Amino acid sequence: MNSILQDRKECYITRQTGVLHKHHIFFGTGKRKISEDNGFWVWLLPRLHNMSDEGVHFNPQLDKRLKRECQAKYEETHSRAEFMALIGRNYLDD
């Protein structure tokens, strides 16, 4: 499935192209497959993914930003209840 947040292969944060990593916004026990199946992923530069301290895997602010933006986009066409059934947590009211 395509990403619900992007329609082209470029870094979601910087819009740069080149070497990119696919980041599943929700990951861990069963969540990676849910992310893949629902388009809850983005392209990121390696340094913004997991190759530096500013990467989403080490940067709680960036992680939360992506989760919030993903949930908001999903809820443009689905209900909060549908999102909660998939992910089990609401990131928009944090």
Image (spheres, rainbow, N blue to C red):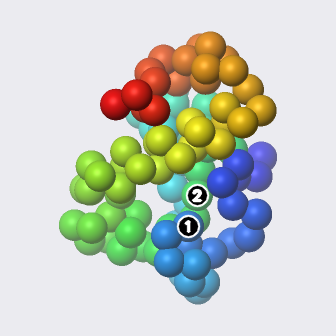
Asked if residue 37 can be seen in this view, the reply is no
Residue 15 at least partly seen: yes
The crowd level at tag 2 (other Cα within 10 Å; few <14, some 14-19, many 20+) is many
Q: Quadrant of residue 49?
A: bottom left
Circle 1 sits on which residue? Answer: 12
Residue 11, by quadrant, is bottom right
For badge 2, the amino acid type reads Val
Tell me how many marks there are.
2
Q: Of 90 and 53, which appears nearest the observer?
A: 90
User: Looking at the picture, does residue 24 appear above or below residue 47?
Assistant: above
Q: Residue at x 27, y 67 (%)?
A: 54
Is 54 left, or right, of 81 in this rendering? left
The residue lying toward the viewer, choosing from 64 and 39, is 64
Q: Which residue is mark 2?
A: 42
Neighbor class of circle 1 (other Cα within 10 Å; few <14, some 14-19, many 20+) is some
Q: On the picture, is 5 further left or further right than 77?
A: left
Closer to the N terminus: mark 1 or mark 2? 1
Residue at the image position 61 percent from the left and 31 percent from the top: 34
Q: What residue is at 53 percent from the left and 47 percent from the top?
A: 69
Element marked by disc 2? strand
Counting from the top left corner in percent of width and height, residue 72 is at 59, 39
